[in-house]
Amino acid sequence: MVVLNMQPPADNKVMEEAAAILKIKDLTVSRSGKVVIHDINLSVRKGEFIGLVGPNGSGKSTLLLSILGVLRAQQGSIQIYGQKPMSRSILGKIGWVSQAAAVMPKNVRITVRELVQLGTLNSRNMFWRRKGIHREKVDQAMKMVGLEGVADNDIARLSGGQRQRAVIGRALASDAQFILLDEPLVGIDRESRNSLLKLLDKLCHDENKTILMVSHDLAAIRQTAHRMIYLEESIRFDGLTEDFPDLTTLAGLRGIEPVHGHSHDKNIPKSIVLGTEKNEHSNKEEE
Ligand SMILES: Nc1ncnc2c1ncn2[C@@H]1O[C@H](COP(=O)(O)OP(=O)(O)O)[C@@H](O)[C@H]1O
Ligand SMILES: [Mg+2]
């Protein structure tokens, strides 16, 4: 079309849009009849490491579940690798890691290798097994997450941080290109947290994976993410990590005073505005 031809070739905005692997347009999602997130516009390019932050109940998990296709858009659209969420052709390209991994029930009897191997099961190869290739993928994934030494250990015997890495290993074995993590740092000790962050950073830089991580650990996000998104029903900030506003400015963006106390949810702190350093410990104490 003539209109398209008239676009200036060096229009960065247009180029960026075209290269996006995730495109969200005017998204509204409701749960139990209540609008939880609205007017979400977002595009993510391959290789980005994005930190998604916001107070408890602000819709972060809802946004991830919408991207995964578990929750439906009430309005607007989501395109991931040019497809609708949960399309057959993108199965396996997306990995999901939740905080539940670190606190997996102790009575699940499965080895690290078996868990990682589960990642190689998908609709594309269900009926066409190539054991050699699978084994290689599993070995490689275990190596990437630094668990090759405990491959045959029961996951119940691992630390929370190791278990979290095992779940990431499962995503890697599936060839996941885009990894979504929902509070992966909850319930793990400081050392595991640091090694997990290092791993994610490496996956992003060396393997060109795209990472979208939800965390209330602002220090962790600042340390690893190139871009930050602050969500509270809608996106209040989306930009470079170094431009992320200080807490006072953030309170202004939220348009309300910081919320204190009154949360019944024991897993996630009341608000990121309450600070970040103590969260890890307070979670632990409440467990
Ligand atoms: N299954 C559900 N049914 C109805 N409302 C829900 C459900 N899960 C979450 N919500 C509501 O959606 C809002 C956003 O929740 P969520 O996306 O989990 O927030 P976050 O992950 O940022 O803490 C909250 O008000 C929460 O009460
Ligand atoms: Mg959540």
Image (cartoon, rainbow, N blue to C red):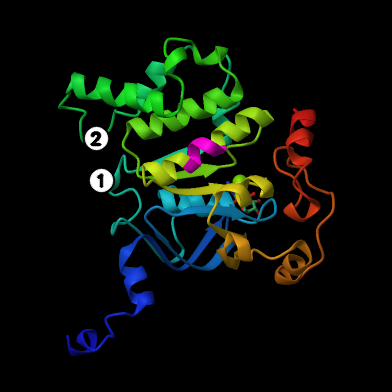
**Overall secondary structure of the magenta section:** helix
User: Which residue bears the numbered disc 1?
Assistant: 88
Tell me which corner region of the image, top left, top right, bottom left or bottom right, holds residue 115. top left
* Real-space Cα separation, disc 2 to disc 1, in angstroms: 8 Å
Q: Measuring 81% from the left and 61% from the top, which residue is drawn there?
A: 258
* Disc 2 to disc 1: CB gap under 8 Å: yes
Q: Which residues are magenta?
A: 197-201
- Where is 1 relative to 84, above or below? below
Say which element carries label 1. Answer: helix
Tell me which corner region of the image, top left, top right, bottom left or bottom right, holds residue 177. top left
Q: How far across and down, in percent of the image, does residue 275 sit?
A: 78, 50
Disc sitting over residue 123 in the figure: 2
Q: Is residue 163 left or right of residue 88?
A: right
Q: Measuring 78% from the left and 31% from the top, which residue is drawn there?
A: 286
Instruction: Name the quarter where the N terminus is drawn.
Output: bottom left
Q: Measuring 34% from the left and 30% from the top, which residue is drawn there?
A: 173
Q: Measuring 77% from the left and 56% from the top, which residue is drawn there?
A: 273
Say few, some or many: other residues with alpha carbon within 10 Å of mark 2 (under 14 / 14 to 19 / 20 or more). Answer: few
Along the line of sight, the residue nearer the viewer: 212 or 71: 212
Q: Amino acid at mark 1?
A: Arg
Q: How far across and down, in percent of the image, does residue 133 sit?
A: 21, 24
Q: How far across and down, in percent of the image, does residue 259 sit?
A: 81, 57
